[in-house]
Amino acid sequence: MEVAKGVRSAVRINGGVDQQRAVELDLESVCEKVSALVSGNAVVVFTISGCCMCHVVKQLLFGLGVGPTVVELDRDASGGPILALLNRLAAGGGGGKAVPAVFVGGKFLGGIETVMACHINGSLVPLLKNAGALWL
Amino acid sequence: MNSTTTQFVPSRRMGLYEPVHQMSMWGDFRNTLLDSSPPPELMLEVNANLDNQSEDTTSHGTFAASHRNDQEASKPDDKVLRRLAQNREAARKSRLRKKAYVQQLENSKLRLIQLEQELNRVRQQGLCVGGGIDTSQLAYTGNSNPGISAFELEYGHWVEEQNRQISDLKNALHSDMGDTELQIFVDGGMQHYFELFSMKVMAARADVFYIMSGMWKTSAERFFLWIGGFRPSELVKQVLSPHLDALSEQQRLDIVNLTQSCQQAEDALSQGMEKLQFILAQAIADGLLREGNYLPQIGAAMNKLDDLVRFVVQADHLRQETLQQLSRILTTRQAARGLLALGEYLQRLRALSSCWSSRPREQA
């Protein structure tokens, strides 16, 4: 899975082998979990309940006619580890916030900024259609 | 002499002066003569002279006139004394009124000097630079935030540069410049807006409420405020679309799609803002009427305000993405015209603000 590979290489770069192996195992299980979620659903959005920017992303997708799978990390048992994973993804992408995090068609798309940019430049809707999230 | 006009009042009976007018003229003459309260002896002397003169006129006047004159002559002291007293009183009141008026003028002058000094001092601190701050904003001079002062200074320079770029662009479009050269102007114009967005993000981190209230903008610009700036969809619809000519079918479609995407993104951001307002209000209103202080609520609210900065960042990002998408859709010449239209539109808004703030005020 793309996400897991990206994260593993990021982790390897960051630290010593012993310490990182333990973290890798944890991350691996989280990656598996996340990968299962995102491949099973066309659009997955990871949010935190109080976060207003997460609300923005949800409203944008709802407005387009998309019914995303929303995972509220503060209400989920494995919310903590998933958030850590998302933090790494965000850091890799250039320093945005971890949430909201949007996955389309099993792949990590990005945060609010990326989603907005894709929508304005016209690439979001085709992406959603390809993933089967939109039918028109 | 205040009765000279009555002297020549035309009468239907030719050659006959209205005796009453003539008498009043003499009376007034006496009054003005006696205005400065002369000593009694002189008064009598003058009276005697006047009486003689009045007697002379009776040969021209009617019997009624001379009769009246005799009446007045028989009681000169009472009426004259009363008139003298009245004149003294009137003069005194007049002097007091004049004194009060002059005092008021002096006070107003001092106040004006104070206000001018304050204005100069505030201007020197760089708080009134750029965009035409009208007097109603002087109330905001309590801002000692260095990040904001720096932003205001920079914004002043930005507007000056903007005006220069607009006239350069105008000249470039009217010349027979080629597209490659024109593209340089377009790129420069776009870059200039992107610089403004970076400036605003930094200022938002210094004071997000300042940016959200559009404090650096002129009053008319503030009327159109949406999350610290313009609504990109409105700019595309109102300012750019009507003035883009020779659009191909594909371009037309692309512009329509862009407008729609903008609106959808704006709506999503607006809904997020509403949620933030709700959460903030909830945090502040928590536990009203309870014992103890409100510090925990204020603390909770402060944390939520970080989210507000994120909204300003995303709104400006949306504006930037919209401009970039436009530059992708349009040809060089179309983009140049679009930038010029936008620049002129903003100039007109600023002009409207100036005009508005210097309009003559109606007296209440």
Image (tube, coloured by chain):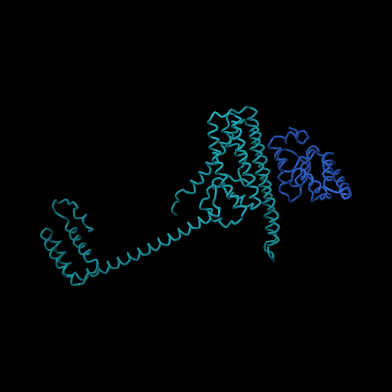
Chain colours: A blue, B cyan
Asked whether residue B243 appears in the rendered view, the answer is yes
Answer with left or right where residue B23 lies relative to residue B331: left
Q: Is residue B186 above or below residue B105?
A: above
Q: Position of residue B108 (x, y in %)?
A: 43, 60
- Determine the residue positioned at 22% across, 57% down: B3
Q: In which quarter of the image is the C terminus of chain B?
A: bottom left
Which residue shows up at 54% across the image and 52% down it? B128
Q: Nearer the viewer, residue B258 or B334?
A: B334
Query: In this view, which residue lies farthest toward the left?
Result: B59
Which residue occupies the foreground of this view, A73 or B204?
Answer: B204
Would residue A120 appear left or right of A77 to someone viewing this image?
left
Q: Is residue B108 above or below residue B45?
A: above
Q: Nearer the viewer, residue B162 or B35?
A: B162
Quarter of the image for the N terminus of chain B: give it: bottom left
Would residue B123 appear left or right of B332 to someone viewing this image? left
Query: Residue B105 at x, y = what percent?
Result: 40, 60
Where residue B340 sits, quadrant-wise, is: top right
Q: Where residue B54 appears, x then y in whole percent? A: 14, 63
